[in-house]
Amino acid sequence: MSPLATKLAAELEAEPTQFHDLVDSHRDEAWREFLTAWGEMREAGILGRADDGCYYVGDPPPETD
């Protein structure tokens, strides 16, 4: 994976995040590069999505009521 995809994956492994929040925290990246990195993670099959809409890498976050 590209350095940006690796960085995004590490962030999502550390803390599940809504897509728009991830985008907001990487506004310094070119949109095309961001989407390419996102696509790399999807193709690698490492992205998960919790019921609350947050994306994560690794184990799913615990469910909250």
Image (cartoon, rainbow, N blue to C red):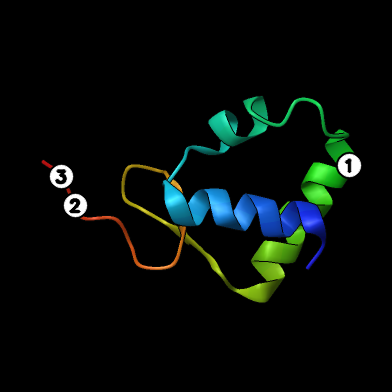
Residue extending farthest left = 65
Residue 41 higher or lower than 15, as above or below: below
Three-letter residue code for mark 1: Arg
Q: Residue at x 33, y 62 (%)?
A: 60
Dot 2: few (<14), some (14–19), or many (≥20) neighbours within 10 Å?
few
Question: Which mark identifies residue 32?
Answer: 1
Residue 39 locus on image (x, y percent): 75, 59
Three-letter residue code for mark 2: Glu
SS at badge 1: helix
Residue 49 locus on image (x, y percent): 43, 55
Nearest the viewer among 21 and 8 is 8
Residue 38 locus on image (x, y percent): 71, 53
Q: How far is mark 3 from mark 1, CA to CA?
A: 34 Å
Question: Which mark identifies residue 64?
Answer: 3
SS at badge 3: loop
Question: Do tag 2 and tag 3 residues touch (Cβ < 8 Å)?
Answer: yes
Question: Which mark identifies residue 63?
Answer: 2
Q: Mark 1 or mark 3, which is nearer the start of the sequence?
A: 1
Image quadrant where residue 24 sits: top right
Q: Residue at x 48, y 37 (%)?
A: 18
Query: With 26 as the anchor, is 62 left or right in this view?
Result: left
Q: How far is mark 1 from mark 2, CA to CA?
A: 33 Å
Location of the C terminus by quadrant is: top left
Image quadrant where residue 22 sits: top right
Query: With 61 as the anchor, is 55 left or right in this view?
Result: right
Q: How far is mark 2 from mark 3, CA to CA?
A: 4 Å
